Amino acid sequence: MKKVAKILKWLLSVVGLLLMLIILLFGHRDKTVEELSSRYAEAPSAFVEIDGMAVHYRDEGDPRDSLPLVLIHGTSSSLHTFDVWVQLIKPYKRVVRMDLPGFGLTGPFPDRNYHIDHYIDFLEQFLAARGIEHCILGGNSLGGYIAWEFALAKPEIPDKLILIDAAGYPQRSASVPVGFALARTPFLNKLLTYITPRFLVRSSVENVYADKSKVSDTLVDRYFDLTLRAGNRQALVDRMKSGFDTLKVPQIKNIQAPTLVLWGAQDLLIPVDVAYRFHEDLPHDTLVILDHNGHVPMEESPEESVKAVLRFIGKQP
């Protein structure tokens, strides 16, 4: 017994030393909004108070446009994912985007509730705060899921929908970003809130790109920095625990808003067969599949993907 106890004590010591080494090498403190704002909240960024949160947003283009394009990013992303799109669209259309609660500079929901209904309530409050009564509503991944659920809950607000590799249907991922996998894994997800190696972030971004060579150091820096925004790492864990409620999937056929379904053919996270399910169920849709693109075509191939958007909103240059 003494020998077994010694071995266990030795193993625990080794594990403890390894954990300390990992923390020293890869542990990162939270960053404040003030620290990050100089780099990621430059003009035309602004903040609006909603439900106890200072929500980071950008409102660009003609302010007189009463039917703006509202864009919603996906999990672990930010409004910056649409940067190039906005530059190409705003000469023709007002474009509004925000950092969802839990991500970007907005930070976590105070009550840590990341159910889809809570996001729908948030979006309704945000649109009201910006004086938006009608819009064209678009979203990527989680943002697409919020968009089509919002169209079911508030059909009078979105005149059109743009679903970009949108979540919602039950599906099997061919590959999942390692950061997402860790956030779903008990014990490891606790460590993730303290230990976040930059290479982990790079690997997760590369996972959603078809062409890994397009993942630049600057892009990884942005994802990494905003992951470290105070509260965001715990928010990712909380969001993953919330999962996806598929109960409303049968109601997709009731969405009457004309919809653009835009998809990367090489999306491994939400495979392209889901795009065809949207196409089959939506009564008024246009399906565009982009070859050589992954899960975030607006970021991976912005000039190519935005063409379909401009055609859809009737602003072809």
Image (tube, rainbow, N blue to C red):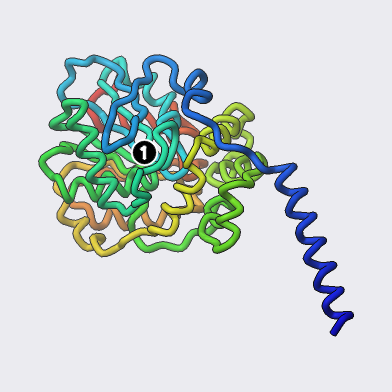
Give the crowd class for mark 1: few <14, some 14-19, many >=20 residues within 10 Å: many
- Kindly identify which residue carries mark 1: 100
Q: Residue furthest front?
A: 2
Q: Which residue lies at the image location 26% right of the left edge and 29% below the top edge? A: 69
Mark 1 element type: loop
- Compared to residue 289, the image places residue 12 above or below, namely below
The answer to whether one can see residue 37 in this image is: yes
- Compared to residue 17, the image places residue 133 above or below, namely above
- Percent position of residue 255, x then y: 17, 50
Choose between 59 and 32: the one closer to the eye.
32
- Percent position of residue 202, x then y: 62, 40
Q: Which residue lies at the image location 78% right of the left edge and 65% below the top edge? A: 12
Amino acid beneath label 1: Leu
- Percent position of residue 268, x then y: 51, 53
Q: Residue furthest right?
A: 3
**Left or right: 204, with 80 as reference point:** right
Quadrant showing the N terminus: bottom right
- Percent position of residue 233, x then y: 51, 45
Q: Which residue lies at the image location 20% right of the left edge and 39% below the top edge? A: 124
Choose between 238 and 87: the one closer to the eye.
238
